[in-house]
Image (cartoon, coloured by chain):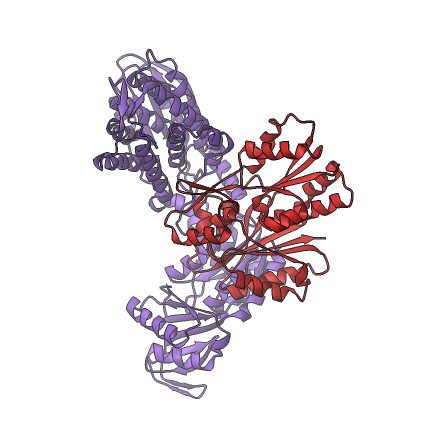
Chain colours: A purple, B red
Amino acid sequence: MSETNSIAGQVLRDMFSTATSWLEKSSADIDALNVFPVPDGDTGTNMMLTMRSTMEEAYRAPDNSASAIAHAMAKGALMGARGNSGVILSQIWRGMAQGLDGKESFNAAEMAEALLKSADIAYKGVSNPVEGTMLTVMKDAAKEAKAQVDRGEEDVIGLLEAVVNAAGDSVARTPRLLKVLKDAGVVDAGGQGLYTILEGALRFLKGELELMRLRKPQIIVSDLPSTVPLPQATGVDEVPFGYCTEFLLKGEKLEPESISKRLEKKGESLIVVGDESAVRIHIHTLEPGSIVQFATKLGTLHQVSIRNMDEQHQDFLEMQKERMPTTDTAVIAVASGDGLKDVFGSLGAAAVIPGGQTMNPSTKDILQAVQSVPSENVIILPNNKNIILTAGQVESLTEKKIKVVPTRTIPQGVVALLAFDYEADFKTNAEIMEKALSSVKTIEVTKSVRATRINGLHIKRKQPIGLLDDELIAAGDTDLDVINKILDKLDMKEAEVVTIYYGEDVQAEEAEKISASITEQYTNLQVELIKGNQPHYSYILSIE
Amino acid sequence: MAVKIVTDTLSDITGDLAAQLGITVVPLYVRFGEEVYRDRVDISSEDFYRRLVNEPKLPSTTQPTPNDFAEVYRKLAQETDEILVIVVSSKLSGTYQSAMQAKEYVKDKCRIEVVDSMTVAMGEGLIVVSAVNAIKKGAGLDQAAEMVRKAHDRSHLIAYFDTLKYLAKGGRIGKAKEFLGAMLSVKQILTVRDGEMAPLTRVRSMRAGLDYLTSVVASYQNRIEGLAVEHTTNPEDADVLVERLDAIFPKARILRSIISPVIGTYSGPNAMALTILEA
């Protein structure tokens, strides 16, 4: 493929015009990524409208130099910026314009410089930059551009390709940086929007117009395990969000910095950007009136928008409800140890209630979890024989329909959850899940709390003991000894998968030794080792 | 003049079977880096899967161009004045758009009806077979198209995926993304719902997967018009499944095929698909 060493102003304009149409195709998908309390509920639409205004102005540039076009784009972006993401986007164009200032056209190195400038200006525009947003994506993209130039890349398309890939990876990482994204299981909407714009520009340069007409942009999927927030975290939050207030202030000799200082204490998510003649202001405040009053003293107000965010929050909750269940049934589980909680979360439990042996949750704890999930039908996995009854009490305390699948151990809970059938109805699912319990055997290893005689065993205090499906049947010198004694009693020819969850007091090396020993003895088995971090039980083994 | 049928290679109807049915199959494209192949024309399934597993970069796939369809339409227009085009779900591929656009390039006096099958692989393939049979029995274009349009409700594709890695990377994951990120190694059972991949359930092993697939077929006993079993890299597992299904549906009538490399890009190795066309 031939190299493209330089980009002229017209190409700059055309590539981002194409990118705008590309973004437009997925703006609804990007809207759907929004997570409150990351504000503006329609990031995709806002970015698309901002880009439209950006490009309209680009066609009014006084000449066709890269500099003139970039400055026109920056102006158009500022005038038409919508929402938080739009304002940040306008700062990206402002940085680009500064980077390309005075240039007729630009090469790879100059493009990298301009991108770095974009990242820099974008960060400066936000009073409290948050990582895991489009700011991070912009920064990572610019960093990659710089790295490519340092490596000697001279082809602008090659450079942009690397930048787009880096931006995509950065978008995929956003849930690692921002908990609200992780909890909602989505990537950052603004970051996705920025990625889509860059990708659109790249596709234009690669001449993929026909392809772009037929396809639409892909939303990036996070590779992060989707964990679920505990019910406490999803409880009703009564803190008011106030009003999302934004407008364009036009005047003379405006000073964005001093305006920013004046407004700093008036609210959250403050952004003040612009120049002497036009400043865009975005803030979340409980008193929009005082902000507007202050601004009218400095100049004239345009495009004033004041939106009630509590209303937006309600809309968001509604949207969440629509988006969450592909089924109207939620499964909640009882488990302790963050490893075990994550196992249930990653397998799709809607909530995990802390509890287990010697820490049985109350009926109220379970009821609270039941109420917190957005489904009318709830299946409860108690995962302990002492919790089955408590869970059964919940049914009479809620209007939701409840089924308790009587799981007595963690492995039973896991097989029940796995057997969940997305196409089956509530009642059938409870049956399928209960039926699955017979497919697993559970070994639990713990230490005896006192000396005793039971089931023909003489047990000393603190001696390792083992339970098979809740029944004490072995005692030994070491954990491994106990495990082996129980495994000897089982018909292992039927087994296929052994999962070992090791407890909070067990060292990883110890657990690996046990895993290796089982793998060696039973060569046909698939053995999996997981840090369950559960208290009391040094090991819980699932044999399927 | 009898209606002629056109489909795409995602129906997994290729080679002898296509010839036997008397239909035209338009290939999609598979791309490894700069090398572009027509699905099972320039690259065999075996070669494809070998490369899928061994090469560091995943291949990408592209729909046929409108021109690919237009050429087929023009050629068939010499023989017939009615063409029924059955394509893969428009939520999974742009093939439907290409097939539709191609109509504008054909000046011949020939009616062309393009139907979105809303499914894929043999889910689509068994619908094509059913359409061929309907036309043999004398159905016209409108009647056959109407049957095909409704057929996805009785076409049940159930896929066993050893991993979701490939599906996630290809961005075609749809609602099946709920299965991503499990902390245990689990095998996913997916289906096609409303034209895209959707989760069904999960198992821990291939054997449990075979049990599940068998139980699904058993639940349709005596209501089965067609049954198909497909694999990617693992014919022996698919053979085991066919043997087990023999008790429910005679294995001689079970259609065997290989999952298209285009789908293989997303399903990865060791995958299986079972399709039931309800009577």
The image quadrant of residue A80 is: top left
Where the N terminus of chain A falls, by quadrant? top left
The image quadrant of residue A21 is: top left
Counting from the top left corner in percent of width and height, residue B155 is at 65, 50
Looking at the picture, tell me which residue is in the foreground, A461 or A160.
A160
Taking the spot 44% from the left edge, 39% from the top edge, the residue there is A219
Taking the spot 48% from the left edge, 66% from the top edge, the residue there is A383
- Residue B271 visible in image: yes
Looking at the picture, tell me which residue is in the foreground, A223 or B59.
B59
Can you say whether A151 is above or below B178 in the image? above
Counting from the top left corner in percent of width and height, residue A349 is at 48, 55
Can you say whether A263 is above or below A342 in the image? above
- Residue A185 visible in image: no
Count numbered badges in the picture: 0
Give left or right: position of A436 versus A39.
right
Q: Residue furthest right?
A: B138
Taking the spot 63% from the left edge, 50% from the top edge, the residue there is B17
The image quadrant of residue A205 is: top left
Looking at the picture, tell me which residue is in the foreground, A453 or B279.
B279
Counting from the top left corner in percent of width and height, residue A126 is at 30, 31
Looking at the picture, tell me which residue is in the foreground, B1 or A44.
B1
